[in-house]
Image (tube, rainbow, N blue to C red):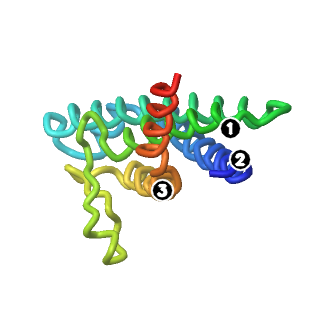
C-alpha cells in the first residue's frame, strides 16, 4: 500500500473517529443509568442491560479517543511514518471496529443479512430509548465504513509484521 494512500486513510479515519467520539461523549455526558431505566419501563429487566450498554460505550469512547489522538500525532509529524501509521490503523480495526461490533455486554448484534435488504444490520437485544438507538445506528455507519476500509490491517498487516520478524 502506498504511503500516500496510508496517509489519506489516516486522515479519513481520524475525522470519522473524532466525529463518533464527540457523539459518544455528548451522549454519555447527558444520560444517566436511572434516566434510561425510567424511560424503558421494568427496572429489573433494564437496569443490568443499560449498565452493560453504557459500560460498552465508555470503553468504545476510550478506544476511539486513543486512536484518533495517535492518528493526530502521526499526521502532525514533519515526516509521515508509514510503519507507525499502519500500526495505528491496525489498532483502530482491532480495538475500535471490533469493540463496536462485538460489545462485551452483548447488548446488540449485527445481522449481516439485513444489510442486503436496506434495513439496519444492528439488532438490539431489548427495545432501547430512541436516543440510544439513533446513537448506535449512527455509529454503525461510521464503523461499517472503517471496517470496509481497514480490513486489510486485520490480516495483511499481521502477516507483514510476522514476515519482518522472521527476517530479523
Query: Which residue carries the number 1 mark?
Result: 82
Sooner in the amino-acid sequence: mark 1 or mark 3: 1
Q: Is residue 129 above or below residue 80?
A: below
Mark 1: give few (<14), some (14-19) or many (20+) Cα within 10 Å.
some
Residue 70 position, x and y percent, is 64, 29
Nearer to me, 43 or 49: 49
As measured in the structure, the alpha-carbon distance from the residue carrying label 2 to the one carrying label 3 is 30 Å
Q: Name the element at disc 1.
A: helix
- Residue 111, percent from left and from top: 25, 61
Q: Is residue 16 left or right of residue 109?
A: right
Contact between marks 1 and 2 (CB within 8 A): the answer is yes
Which residue in the structure is indicated by mark 3? 138
Residue displayed at 52% across by 30% down? 164
Q: Is residue 30 visible?
A: no
> In terms of sequence position, does the residue under pointer 2 or pointer 3 come before the other?
2
Disc 1 to disc 2, C-alpha distance: 6 Å
Q: Residue furthest bottom?
A: 117
* Coordinates of residue 63 in the picture (x, y in percent): 49, 31
Q: Which residue is mark 2?
A: 3
Residue closer to the observer: 21 or 127? 21
Left or right: 30 in relation to 82: left
Amino acid at each position: 500500500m502506498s504511503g500516500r494512500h496510508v496517509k489519506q486513510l489516516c486522515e479519513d479515519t481520524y475525522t470519522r473517529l473524532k466525529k463518533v467520539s464527540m457523539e459518544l461523549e455528548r451522549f454519555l455526558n447527558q444520560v444517566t443509568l436511572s434516566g434510561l431505566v425510567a424511560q424503558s419501563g421494568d427496572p429489573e429487566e433494564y437496569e443490568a442491560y443499560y449498565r452493560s450498554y453504557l459500560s460498552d460505550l465508555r470503553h468504545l469512547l476510550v478506544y476511539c479517543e486513543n486512536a484518533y489522538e495517535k492518528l493526530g500525532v502521526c499526521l502532525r509529524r514533519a515526516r509521515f511514518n508509514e510503519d507507525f501509521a499502519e500500526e495505528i490503523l491496525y489498532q483502530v480495526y482491532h480495538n475500535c471496529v471490533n469493540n463496536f461490533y462485538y460489545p462485551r455486554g452483548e447488548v446488540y448484534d449485527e445481522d449481516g443479512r439485513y444489510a442486503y435488504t436496506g434495513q439496519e444490520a444492528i439488532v438490539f437485544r431489548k427495545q432501547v430509548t430512541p436516543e440510544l438507538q439513533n446513537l448506535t445506528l449512527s455509529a454503525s455507519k461510521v464503523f461499517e465504513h472503517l471496517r470496509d476500509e481497514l480490513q486489510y490491517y486485520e490480516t495483511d498487516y499481521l502477516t507483514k509484521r510476522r514476515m519482518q520478524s522472521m527476517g530479523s
